Structures are given as structure tokens and as C-alpha cells.
Amino acid sequence: MAANKKLLVLPGDGIGPEVMRETIRVIDWMDRKRRASFDLQDDLVGGAAIDQKGTPITEETVARAKAADAVLFGSVGGPKWEKLGFDMRPELSILTLRRELGLFANLRPAIVLDPLVNASTLKPEVVQGLDIMIVRESTGGIYFGEPRGIETLADGSQRGINTEVYTTMEIERVARVGFELARKRQSRVCSVEKANVMESGLLWRQVVTRLAAAEYPDIALSHMYADNCAMQLVRNPRQFDVIVTGNLFGDILSDLASMLTGSLGMLPSATLGAPDASGRRHALYEPIHGSAPDIAGKGVANPLAQMLSFAMLLRYSFDMEEDAALIEKACTNVLASGLRTPDVMAPGCAKVGTTVMGEAVLRELDKLAT
Ligand code: IPM
Ligand code: MG
């Protein structure tokens, strides 16, 4: 048996704890049935941490995240904490983890599973077989750039400021992640910015072009302005393989792309740091759906995105491709069998809640593993 893998589990707020509970059962299953063994530690983040510790994330939690092999994150936020200042928002917990752990590459796959092809608001013939990977830069750009703030002008009116800023190093390292991923896929990368209006975008384009020529001649690189990319994602999403883009455009385009698949409740993500000399890297895995306060506590949340985030964790942090694929297959099979949480409900399917969905995945895992 391999050495214990240390995971920090941060369920957070809203539906986070509900979907995490089902995912822990999958982790336990892996522990029992496969060659992996996990040490789980859990902790508070987001609103839960604000309520109990007076801050969205404590320094101890950040230290635990640094010490762990990987972080499995749920979701944070909710109406209860919406009025708090920027230094007290639940969202600060995820931003702090990205910054403190140097998690600069946010991988957001948008995949249309066959059983869900009709869940998309787009026509099935447009999205069938869709498999895009968005690589979003996640520790730079306008999210973190200085100067920032709200200042009061001489006439008493105010001015809000944020700064989009990217350095050669920041662009290169995230582009590299995109190029490496593309090599394992269809070898196509589309780099997205606004080089027509922004200097940071122009530099982005120049750096990516140079890197591709020097190190990735086997990759077909294209460039697109972010607004056009939004349009193309809806018009003909299958033209894309890997998209590499900055923090803000990636935030927006990845929400857009996720909805091509029909449900936010289905999509996982990974956020990776740079590997150290031993190849070890910080990494955080989270569903992209957020805390969904409107359905929290009702037992109807879809646990699949959280489970699929754990599958990504196996793949990217531990190179356990076979086990990752097993979980993905189990999730697809359960959907194909006609079980659906309300977010992906379709005519002729059986509507179930979070726990029943979780149990179905465990049964399917048992079946697949024998
Ligand atoms: C995301 C979210 C976050 C972001 C928020 C919660 C800070 O929207 O992960 O896409 O804007 O990055
Ligand atoms: Mg977002």
C-alpha cells in the first residue's frame, strides 16, 4: 500500500457540506477497495469560519493547506455574509488559498456527458461530445493587481480602482500548463485576451506566441479576443480544445462554458501551483457550482461535481489516472441509468436527492471494480 495521502477537506457553506459528505463516502470507498490510503483533516472556511472564528480563513487553516498533499474544497458564501466588507467576505478564503499556495493555474473542464446532452440549453447537435479545457490564470490580473481601492476625490465623489497587470513570468507559466495539457488532448490551444485594447493583453499575446514557437512547435496555437471567444463558445463550442486566458476573462468564460454542459452541478475544477524540485505541487480541487444557498439544507444538491473534483485530485495530485477514470465512469453510468438530481432532471428519469445519488455512485463503483 502506498503511503498515506494527506488531504485537507474544506466543506464551507451552503450545499458544500452536503455534497462533501457524499464525496467522503467515495474517498472511504477508495480507502477500502483500492490501493490508496487517505488521511483526512477537515476545517472551516468561508461563512462557517466567519461565524466561528471571526475570519473567512485562519492562518492555521492556510498552514494546514500548505502541509497537505491536496485540498478538497467545497463552496463558500451566502446571503448571510453578503453585506460584509471585502476583508471579511467568505470569498476571501478561496482567494487567500490561491494566493498563499501560489495556485496560478485553474483548470476548468467543460464536458458534455452523453446522458446529459439534452440538459444543455443549446441544441444537442451543437454540444454533443463537447470536451473543452479552460486554463484560467488565478493568482494575478485584475483580481490582485495594485493599485486598487475606492478613493474620495476633491469634490467629494468617489473613484473605484482595480488594475490589470501581467508579467512575462506569470503569462509563461500558465501558458505552459495549457500547452502541456493540450499535448495530452488534441494539441490545440486558443489564447484569449483583449490585445486590441489592453497593453497587458498585447504582452500576453506576444509572450504566448514566443513560448509556442520556442517550446511547443507541435501545438496549433490560435489567438482570440475575449469578446469574440464568448460569442464563439455559444456559436460553435467544439472548435475549442484548450483555452488559456487571464483571471477575469477566465472567470467569465468558464461560467459561460459550464452552462454549455447543462448544469453547473456537474463540473469540477483543479487549481495547481508550480511543481517543486521533487515534483510536488500545491493543489486545490473544487466544484465550480458555488454554495447555492437557495437549495442548501434541502438534500437535493447534485454531489457529482464534488465527486468529480476528487477524481481530478487523484489524476493531477497523485497520477492515479485509473482510479480517476473509475469515478468518472461511475458518475456517467449513474446518470445513464436515469437517476437525476433536480438540476439535471429530464423527462423519463427518476428524480432523487443528494444521498440517493451518492449511494448510487457507490453501488456503481462496487460493480465496476469487481
Ligand atoms: C470562481 C468564483 C470566484 C472567482 C469567487 C468566489 C471569488 O467566481 O472561482 O470562479 O471569482 O474567482
Ligand atoms: Mg467565477
Image: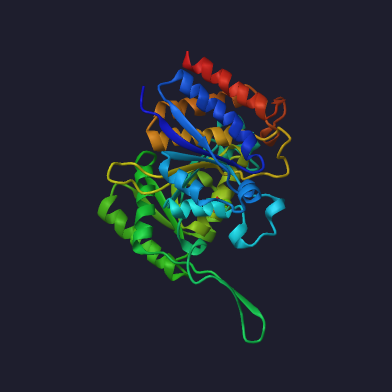
Inspect this view and state whether residue 117 appears: no
- In the rendered image, which quarter contains the N terminus? top left
Residue at image point 54% right, 60% down: 227
> Which of 108/239 is in front?
108
Q: In this view, does 174 lie to the left or right of 49?
A: left
Q: Residue furthest top?
A: 370
* Vertical relation: 92 (above or below) 242: below
Q: Which residue is drawn at 49% across and 57% down?
A: 247
Q: Which picture quadrant has residue 282?
A: top left
The answer to whether residue 257 is left or right of residue 141 is right
Q: Which of 88 and 122 is in front in this view?
A: 88
Q: Is 272 left or right of 113, judged from the image as shown?
A: left
Residue 121 locus on image (x, y percent):
65, 42
Residue 105 percent location from the top left of the image: 43, 50
User: On screen, 84 above or below 114?
Assistant: below
Way the structure is coloured:
rainbow
Residue that lies at the very extreme toward the left in this rendered image: 214
